[in-house]
Image (cartoon, helix red, strand yellow):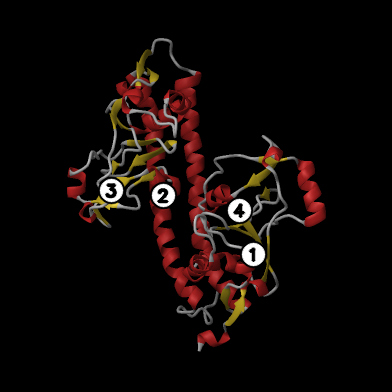
Amino acid sequence: MLMAIWNLVKLGEIASITSSKRIFAKEYQTEGIPFYRGKEIIEKHNGNDVSTELYILRDRYEDIRAKFDVPKPKDILLTSVGTLGVPWLVDESEFYFKDGNLTWIRCNEKTIPEFLYLWFNSSEAQNQIETMCIGSTQKALTIEILKKFDVILPPLEMQNKICAIINPISNKIKTNTMINRNLSEQAQAYFDELFIQNASAEWKEGTLSDVGSIVAGGTPSKSNQEYYTDNGIAWITPKDLSVDKAVFVSHGENDITELGLQKSSATMMPAGTVLFSSRAPIGYIAIAANEICTNQGFKSVVPNDNVGTSYVYYLLKQLLPTIENMASGSTFKEISGSAMKIVPTVIPDDETLKKFSGFCDPIMKQIQKNEQESKRLVELRDSLLPKLMSGEFDVADLDI
């Protein structure tokens, strides 16, 4: 009954699908109009800050806008090479993007942009992306393929109702992210004030091993399935932190078993340990929300009792350039355990450390609380979305 008023259409019938004009690497600037590639769109999709800032000249942007148009708020950009099918509902007025890596989608009068964005996040869309992409070494989505995607499209009124259910959840997740960004900036500013701007000449010189124990990790043999499980001992890889940019981490993509722990060099670390990726790449930083272990791509710091997790977390952020300079390797840079132990740093007095912890520990607890709430909301949204997009949940009679 419900699906009878939903229409099966092609994506190309309800939206224009195109890409950008070619921007060459030699045109990249250090300031100007922001320029996004797939990596930056994935970060924006996840609510994170852009980690690598690229720009193009304003004159170049204005020339493109005058001749060919540029993305506007409520357009959609979709990753189309490598990591496929990650959408971003545009909420900025001035930026440009890399051709080939991204596809630019603009809804026509038949579709609400927020609804189409939700559709791209649904299993229905993601399954088509997986089955219709081309390429063996590097997967890709072409414009012509996207135009042929099947969309089961409800009437505009029902599109609005579906968005009215999902959008408040998504908005709360975004709000939590913004609050946490502000809280982290407050903590960072206080760290700078206490330990950089007002550093005492009486503080002694030391190394990272003076503020905590440096702990490496290990990987159980991937050939033995008895070492891995879906619900076991939390085991983190750098890839996990590349996907989840949260301050606190509890589990990664894979857990290991007690046997896997015993048969590897992975080491259990307590909650409050500050994880630090030591290769591929150097510098992912997160706090263990519970007992945890890692693979060999980490040199983590278990803080001394008088130092505290908050201080070590912001200290490692400040020491990152020093650590990178101490790394070695030809294929990729890595900081060894022995080198990590001797990274130079000053050792503040206990009173100043206590002052910092007194200010920052409540902030970090609130950040963790907000992240936990956001994860629950993501689970709720992701469970509702397929039921709404398939028509399993009938919203026709809802007064929204």
Query: Is 191 situated above or below 239?
Result: above
Q: What residue type is labelled 2?
A: Glu
Q: Mark 4 points at which residue?
A: 101
Q: Residue 234 carries which label?
A: 3
- Mark 2 or mark 4: which comes first in sequence? 4
**How far is the residue under mark 2 from the one under mark 1?**
36 Å
Residue found 74% across the figure and 40% down from its top: 57
Q: Can residue 245 be seen in this view?
A: no
In three-dimensional space, the C-alpha distance between marks 3 and 1, rounded to whole angstroms, equals 41 Å
User: Label 3 near label 2: C-beta < 8 Å?
Assistant: no
Q: Nearer the viewer, residue 27 or 368?
A: 27
For the residues carrying marks 2 and 1, which lies nearer the camera in this image?
A: 1
Identify the amino acid type marked 4: Asn
Task: Kindly indicate whether the residue at mark 3 contacts the one at mark 4 (C-beta within 8 angstroms).
Answer: no
Write down the residue under mark 2.
371
Structural crowding at the residue carrying mark 4, measured as other residues with C-alpha within 10 Å and reported as few (<14), some (14–19) or many (≥20): many
- The residue carrying pointer 1 sits among few (fewer than 14), some (14 to 19) or many (20 or more) residues within 10 Å by Cα, namely some
Spot occupied by residue 105 in the image (x, y as percentages of width and height): 65, 63
Q: Which three-letter amino acid code belongs to the residue tagged 3? A: Ala
Q: In terms of secondary structure, where does tag 1 sit?
A: helix
Q: In this view, does 98 lie above or below 201?
A: below
